[in-house]
């Protein structure tokens, strides 16, 4: 068997990604906390509760874990409801706490990548109609400006919005996220307001910090037609357009194309310095008239693919390559802002990790300008409507005691980060079943 080493570029960012509501604990002042309190909204009636207790200070030990594992970057998010607990009140102590976290990364020689909105909204905003209200697009840049002013000493890499199109679709079309609406017109309105909010935040951040690099973290799901039927092909193409492409395209062109909601938003044109990619999996799409909430599709995994616990994620590493090809079409630097798999037993994760990173390396060899990779996630955290049932962490969390236990994938990832490469030896040690595939004769 041939031996080889897949090298990554010097200065490549290796990290993990987290989000405020999923890790901080006791975020009582946002719409998710209220949603969790309603019966039937979260699987098994789970609550985020103390989460990973980052607000209680355990971010320190988790940042130590990341740093000791040779990660040189970390992506975390700011909780808007903590920074601006009421429309007319800023909480400087919350900003101090976030400053301490960002400095905590710098002190560990890690680059901070900070997200300003990751699915959670202040309760007061939700009470004003949330993102359906155009005012949200004016309020968000004010919060963004305030936060960047406070943190700019420690960070110049910003994500304004995490997975904006998925957020709009899950919250306003599919009804899985608060406010649980199922309305196409509302979804289109929210999409447009999110584009406006991003554009205004982009300008605000640049004014405060001209050297800032600002983008979004775009959720990209691969969609392939289930059959050769022209209807399935069209359905796959449309789903791709709406979920994957519409939002970043609006930031490129200033025009949002979304069902029942085309909008010209010229101020959005050219407001991305890089494209953040969140990739997990790829699905087959069949046309199904009548399923409005699913944009007239039925979507499912190709039975040929291995799936994670509960059938949540299919392991399709080539799908990441295809996603990177799509990113490359935007002609911007690319950051993989999320990629990972739920796997409490850590049986699939090592394979998933190595094969996906192998695809990143292939894309780098095509000269795609990929600047970093952030694995989702550092420690098991609260997985939204699926509660604690999905374990994405390199470290396992005991939700009762908050104890952390390292999974083998944490060591595997550490070896890759430390070496800035994937070698035959690493593959042999952690995923010998992949040797023939990655190093063919
Ligand atoms: O946990 C989420 C994260 O908040 C957004 N992207 C997908 C992850 C896994 O489902």
Image (spheres, grey):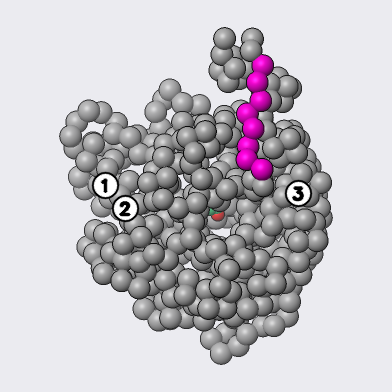
In the visual, does 290 lie left or right of 340?
left
Q: CA distance from mark 2 to mark 1?
A: 6 Å
Q: Earlier in the sequence, mark 2 or mark 3?
A: 3
Q: Which residue is mark 3?
A: 66
The residue shown at (66%, 25%) is 5
In the visual, does 55 lie left or right of 145?
right
Instruction: Please rate how many residues cluster around mark 1, counting C-alpha atoms within 10 Å: few if below 14, some from 14 to 19, many from 20.
Output: some
* Dot 1: element: helix
Q: Position of residue 128 (x, y in %)?
A: 43, 81
Q: Position of residue 246 (x, y in %)?
A: 33, 56
The residue shown at (67%, 54%) is 74
Answer whether residue 397 is magenta in the image.
no
Answer whether residue 5 is magenta in the image.
yes
Which residues, given as a range, are shown in magenta?
3-10
Q: Is residue 242 above or below residue 91?
A: above
Quarter placement of the C terminus: top right
Q: Position of residue 150 (x, y in %)?
A: 66, 77
Q: CA distance from mark 1 to mark 3?
A: 39 Å
Q: Are marks 2 and 1 in contact (CB under 8 Å)?
A: yes
The residue shown at (66%, 66%) is 155
| Disc 3 C-beta below 8 A from ligand 1 | no
Q: Which residue is mark 2?
A: 242
124 and 116: which is toward the camera = 116
Q: Which residue is mark 1?
A: 238
On the question of residue 68 being in view, the answer is yes
């Amino acid at each position: 068997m041939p031996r080889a080493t897949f090298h990554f570029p010097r200065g490549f960012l290796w990290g993990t990604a987290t989000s405020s509501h999923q890790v901080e604990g006791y975020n009582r002042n946002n719409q998710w906390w209220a949603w969790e309190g309603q019966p039937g909204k979260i699987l098994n009636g789970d609550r985020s509760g103390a989460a990973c207790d980052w607000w209680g200070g355990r971010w320190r030990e988790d940042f130590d874990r990341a740093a000791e594992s040779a990660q040189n970057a970390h992506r975390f998010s700011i909780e808007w409801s903590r920074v601006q607990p009421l429309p007319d009140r800023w909480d400087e102590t919350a900003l101090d706490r976030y400053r301490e976290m960002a400095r905590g990364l710098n002190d560990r020689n890690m680059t901070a990548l900070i997200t300003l909105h990751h699915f959670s909204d202040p309760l007061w905003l939700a009470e004003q109609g949330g993102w359906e209200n155009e005012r949200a697009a004016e309020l968000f840049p004010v919060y963004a400006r305030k936060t960047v002013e406070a943190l700019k000493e420690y960070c110049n890499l910003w994500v304004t919005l995490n997975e904006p199109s998925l957020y709009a679709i899950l919250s306003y079309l599919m009804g899985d996220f608060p406010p649980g609406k199922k309305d196409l017109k509302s979804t289109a309105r929210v999409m447009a307001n999110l584009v406006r909010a991003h554009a205004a935040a982009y300008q605000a951040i640049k004014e405060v910090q001209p050297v800032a690099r600002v983008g979004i973290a775009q959720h990209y799901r691969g969609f392939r037609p289930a059959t050769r039927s022209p209807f399935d092909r069209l359905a796959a193409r449309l789903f791709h357009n709406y979920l994957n492409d519409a939002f970043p395209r609006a930031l490129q062109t200033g025009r949002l194309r979304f069902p029942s909601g085309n909008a010209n938003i010229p101020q959005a044109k050219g407001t991305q310095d890089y494209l953040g990619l969140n990739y997990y999996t790829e699905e087959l799409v069949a046309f199904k008239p009548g399923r409005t909430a699913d944009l007239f599709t039925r979507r499912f995994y190709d039975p040929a693919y291995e799936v994670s616990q509960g059938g949540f994620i299919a392991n399709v590493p080539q799908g990441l390559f295809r996603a990177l090809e799509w990113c490359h079409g935007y002609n911007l630097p690319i950051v993989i802002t999320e990629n990972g798999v739920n796997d409490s037993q850590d049986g699939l994760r090592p394979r998933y990790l190595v094969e996906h990173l192998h695809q990143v390396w292939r894309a780098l060899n095509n000269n795609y300008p990929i600047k970093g990779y952030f694995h989702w996630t550092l420690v098991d955290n609260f997985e939204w409507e699926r509660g604690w049932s999905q374990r994405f962490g390199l470290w396992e969390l005991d939700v009762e005691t908050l104890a952390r236990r390292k999974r083998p994938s944490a060591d595997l990832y550490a070896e890759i980060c430390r070496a800035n490469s994937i070698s035959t030896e690493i593959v042999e040690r952690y995923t010998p079943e992949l040797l023939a595939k990655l190093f063919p004769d």
